[in-house]
């Protein structure tokens, strides 16, 4: 146990936190992560710094792909010994303190961190490297503005001049955050959603774009030459020496996971481990905290997909099976989903044309209006998993149905479903 | 044959945060329901703003994008021409603020607006984020029927409080949320409607969409109810106001 070396206050906080978690689990209120973390941090606000000391290898933050990238990097780094990470994608202070307290105290840590919490967690954990993946509109009720987060990240890096940064050169908001930093591995990881980086975060001029390349006619900022690149057909990563890493055997689907893997490979190299060995370990990751996992819910087998914002949805719609296979879409608007689902109008749901969509979740009516205007056949169902739910014909006979959901709906299905 | 009306969606990359492009989609959709053909032209920064469109739409945006959009619109000049000839205009959030005399830039300093609406915007003490509901108000001229009869619903996310000059009517009276910050929401002046309602605005308030269409075609259009929209509105009012 780590407890021997920890300050008394932190030790007693961990004991109290474990008791609270156990009580929460025993009374069936949940997995106990949040309540346990709250108890620990209330008693010992310095607990994260105490537990993190000298063993945090990497922090991972981004609007999209945090959890998957964290899992890929953690798997890769296990080549050099045990690695601790959050098991469920709980990426606020409470989830981080529990992840650090539950595990082998000698294990290195790879932690995903909420975009707003990153400066604070950086201060507390002093990681060797940080990965900055992408920034786009998400939960604007909480995040307010994309550019504001990029400015906070830039200020954060100014206070930590020695940390090594692995950053996406294709996202101008990420470049803005890391541009002044001395130690950066630039990764051409792509940017599927450019609408939140139309103007220069430095001077407000409209950026000039030419495929992946971008530059600012106002202040001269431009895409940095990448050290690592993601290439297509087939997906592969290329390192600074020109060596290629085949990403076609990844267990996780889609362009965005190839991008996540490229970031994780660059981070593996930056940490002094072997990317080729890391890639073999990454290939065995096929489900991340329930994402892409298949669950038995009611009478259906669903493949569970998580998407929270237009950038994420845009890429997720591409990995769904082609029309006319029906799909389920679940939209909630709790705090962790973002309170305002106006972003439904930024998602190209037109891609789903030719099939029937089951619209569900607390904001199923917002989705129904969106689908009506997009001319997509749909049914609005409060609970599609009920035995008598009026599902589209044939849906119950499918071996597997894709169900894309926002965060709280995803978590609810993941915990209530039985892995198939 | 050209369409009955042209809708110009202005600078979606700068002023399209949070689904505001749903406003153009809804206008097109409502126009079709009314038997009107419509074209939406999407104007990006650098493109000339058309002077002869029938309806102009501007959405919300971040502070730096708002300042950039305002400079581009001022340099282009055609939005002023359109406003002065009485074109229908819907301006949401950042787009609403930049129609006024001034608005706060990313540092909170007053930045000059287009001066097409007699409104002034300064920073609120606290950012207004949450559901916004408002009731329609009587017409300025009490012999006229009010423009709107249905309640308004949307979501607001802004740091500005807006004060109206004497020539500008509010769009509504706030039932829940902040709106302009003085108990009113939005502005109406001539054929310009400004509002803090995202949601998007026209998706959740088809009566406003129909009013813009009436101004554009200069004739009455019947009320048309869509069940999916009515259910959405009822659910929002029930959740936000309890009724």
Image: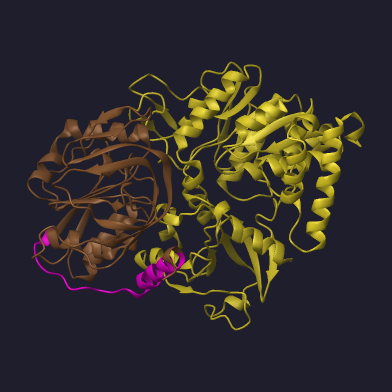
Q: Colour of chain A?
A: yellow
Which residues, given as a range, are shown in magenta? Answer: B216-239
Which is more toward the observer, A83 or B173?
A: B173
Quadrant of the image containing the C terminus of chain A? bottom right
- Where residue A372 sits, quadrant-wise, is bottom left
Which of these two is toward me, B240 or A276? B240
Point out the image quarter for the N terminus of chain A: top right
Q: Position of residue A76 (x, y in %)?
A: 75, 37
Looking at the picture, how far across and down is residue B18, in whole percent? Answer: 40, 49
Left or right: B222 in relation to A129 = left
Q: Residue at x 17, y 54 (%)?
A: B6
Which quadrant of the figure has residue A233?
Answer: top right
Q: At 40% from the left edge and 67% from the top edge, which residue is drawn?
A: B237
x, y percent for residue A26: 82, 61
State whether the magenta stretch is mostly helix, strand or loop: helix
Q: In x, y percent, where is residue A47?
A: 77, 34
Pick whichever, A86 or A273, lies toward us.
A86
Q: Is residue B69 left or right of residue A311?
A: left
Q: Which chain is brown?
A: B
Image quadrant where residue A319 sits: bottom right
């Amino acid at each position: 146990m780590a407890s021997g070396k920890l300050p008394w206050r932190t030790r007693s906080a961990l004991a109290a936190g474990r008791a609270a978690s156990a009580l929460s689990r025993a009374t069936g209120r949940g997995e106990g992560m949040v309540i346990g973390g709250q108890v620990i941090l209330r008693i010992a606000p310095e607990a994260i710094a105490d537990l993190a000391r000298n063993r945090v290898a990497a922090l991972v933050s981004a609007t999209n792909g945090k959890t998957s990238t964290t899992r890929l990097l953690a798997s890769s780094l296990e080549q050099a010994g045990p690695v601790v990470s959050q098991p469920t994608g709980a990426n606020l202070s409470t989830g981080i303190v529990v992840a650090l307290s539950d595990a082998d105290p000698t294990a290195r840590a790879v932690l995903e961190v909420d975009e707003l919490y990153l400066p604070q967690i950086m201060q507390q954990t002093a990681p060797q490297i940080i990965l900055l993946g992408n920034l786009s509109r998400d939960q604007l009720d909480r995040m307010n503005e994309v550019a504001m987060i990029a400015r906070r990240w830039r200020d954060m890096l100014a206070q930590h001049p020695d940390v090594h940064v692995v950053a996406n050169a294709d996202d101008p908001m990420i470049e803005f955050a890391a541009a002044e930093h001395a130690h950066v591995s630039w990764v051409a990881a792509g940017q599927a959603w450019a609408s939140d980086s139309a103007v220069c975060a430095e001077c407000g001029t409209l950026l000039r774009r030419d495929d992946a390349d971008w530059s600012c006619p106002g202040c001269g900022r431009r895409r940095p030459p990448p050290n690592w690149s993601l290439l297509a057909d087939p997906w592969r990563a290329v390192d600074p020496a020109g060596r290629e890493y085949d990403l076609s055997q990844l267990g996780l689907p889609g362009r965005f996971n190839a991008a996540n893997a490229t970031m994780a490979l660059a981070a593996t190299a930056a940490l002094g481990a072997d990317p080729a060995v890391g890639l073999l370990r990454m290939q065995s990751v096929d489900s991340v905290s329930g994402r892409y996992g298949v669950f038995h819910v009611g009478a259906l087998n669903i493949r569970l997909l998580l998407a929270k914002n237009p950038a994420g949805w845009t890429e997720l719609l591409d990995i769904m099976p082609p029309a006319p296979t029906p799909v389920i879409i679940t939209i909630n608007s709790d705090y962790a989903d973002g309170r305002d689902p106006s972003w439904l109008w930024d998602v190209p749901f037109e891609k789903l044309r030719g099939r029937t969509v089951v619209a569900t979740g607390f904001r199923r009516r917002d989705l129904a209006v969106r689908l009506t205007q997009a001319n997509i056949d749909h049914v609005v169902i409060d609970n599609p998993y009920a035995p008598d739910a009026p599902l589209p014909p044939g849906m119950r006979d499918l071996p597997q149905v894709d169900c894309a959901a926002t965060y709280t709906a995803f978590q609810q299905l993941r915990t209530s479903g039985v892995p198939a | 044959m050209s369409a009955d009306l042209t809708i110009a969606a202005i600078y979606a990359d700068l002023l399209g945060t949070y689904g505001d492009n749903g406003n153009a989609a809804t206008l097109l959709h409502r126009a079709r329901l009314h038997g009107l053909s419509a074209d939406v032209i999407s104007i990006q920064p650098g493109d000339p703003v058309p002077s002869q469109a029938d309806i102009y739409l501007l959405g919300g945006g971040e502070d730096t994008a708002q300042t950039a959009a305002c400079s581009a619109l001022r340099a282009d000049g055609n939005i002023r021409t359109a406003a002065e000839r009485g074109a229908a205009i819907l301006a949401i959030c950042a787009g609403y603020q930049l129609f006024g005399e001034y608005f706060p830039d990313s540092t909170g300093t007053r930045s000059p607006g287009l001066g097409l609406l007699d409104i002034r915007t300064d920073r609120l003490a606290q950012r207004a984020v949450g559901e916004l509901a408002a009731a329609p108000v009587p017409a300025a001229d009490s012999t006229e029927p009010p423009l709107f009869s249905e309640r308004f619903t949307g979501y607001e996310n802004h740091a500005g409080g807006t004060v109206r000059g004497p020539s500008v009517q509010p769009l509504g009276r706030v039932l829940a949320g902040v709106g302009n910050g003085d108990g009113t929401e939005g502005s109406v002046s001539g054929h310009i409607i400004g509002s803090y309602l995202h949601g998007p605005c026209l998706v959740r308030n088809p009566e406003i969409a129909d009013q813009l269409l009436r101004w554009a075609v200069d004739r009455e259009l019947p009320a048309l109810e869509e069940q999916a929209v009515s259910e959405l509105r009822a659910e929002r009012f029930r959740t936000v106001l309890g009724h």
